[in-house]
Amino acid sequence: MANEKTRYSDSELQEFKQLILEKINEANEDLKLLKGTLSLSDDHGTDDTGRTFNMMEDGSETLSREEVAQLAARQEKFIQSLHNALLRIENKTYGICRVTGKLIKKERLKLVPHATLSIEAKNAQK
């Protein structure tokens, strides 16, 4: 037990960095699509349809726009969390649970690269 790792090696951190950079690129693409949906550049050509149809559309359109705005906000928060993970890589503190101080398992970090809690700490929160 005395040989337990206290942090990930530089090469392991580089692997995680690559994974996070890929996730950031994907997340930015998704965010761009969401923002495109929010801007009226994506109105599907219903401008010339009848007034009755437009009135019915307005209610559902408002709901959809709110949902898309929430998704965009969540995506921005996710991107910020990924950027914070990159900072932890630079500081060489990436992968260390902020509650237990132990290493978060690689499998968890590959699935949730911005995780700051081990499964044990996460379960203890519930």
Image: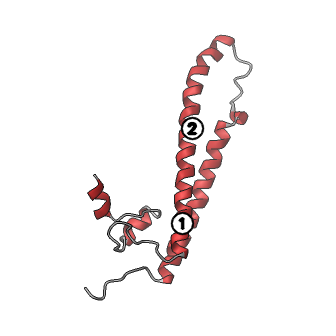
Residue at the farthest top position: 52
Mark 2 neighbour density, 10 Å: few (under 14) some (14–19) many (20 or more): some
Residue 2 vertical placement versus 37 (above, below): below
Quadrant of residue 48 within the rendered picture: top right
Count of residue discs:
2
For the N terminus, give its image quadrant: bottom left
Residue 76 horizontal/vertical position (percent): 57, 50
Q: In the figure, is residue 31 to the left or right of 113?
A: right
As shown in the figure, which amino acid type bears the numbered disc 1? Ile
Residue 121 horizontal/vertical position (percent): 30, 62
Mark 1 neighbour density, 10 Å: few (under 14) some (14–19) many (20 or more): many
How does the figure colour the protein chain or chains? secondary structure
Q: Residue at x 70, y 17 (%)?
A: 49
Q: Secondary structure at mark 2?
A: helix
Q: Residue 68: which numbered mark, if any?
A: 2
Residue 77 horizontal/vertical position (percent): 53, 52
Q: Name the residue carrying label 1.
A: 20
Q: Residue 119: which numbered mark, if any?
A: none
Residue 69 vertical placement versus 98 (above, below): above
Q: Residue at x 64, y 38 (%)?
A: 37
Residue at the farthest bottom position: 3
As shown in the figure, which amino acid type bears the numbered disc 2? Val
Query: Which of the two residues, 28 or 84, is positioned nearer the viewer here?
Result: 84
Task: Kindly indicate whether the residue at mark 2 contacts the one at mark 1 (C-beta within 8 angstroms).
Answer: no
Q: Earlier in the sequence, mark 1 or mark 2?
A: 1
Per the model, the C-alpha gap separating discs 1 and 2 is 24 Å
Q: Secondary structure at mark 1?
A: helix
Q: Residue at x 26, y 58 (%)?
A: 124
Query: Which of the two residues, 61 or 91, is positioned nearer the viewer here?
Result: 91
Residue 67 horizontal/vertical position (percent): 53, 35
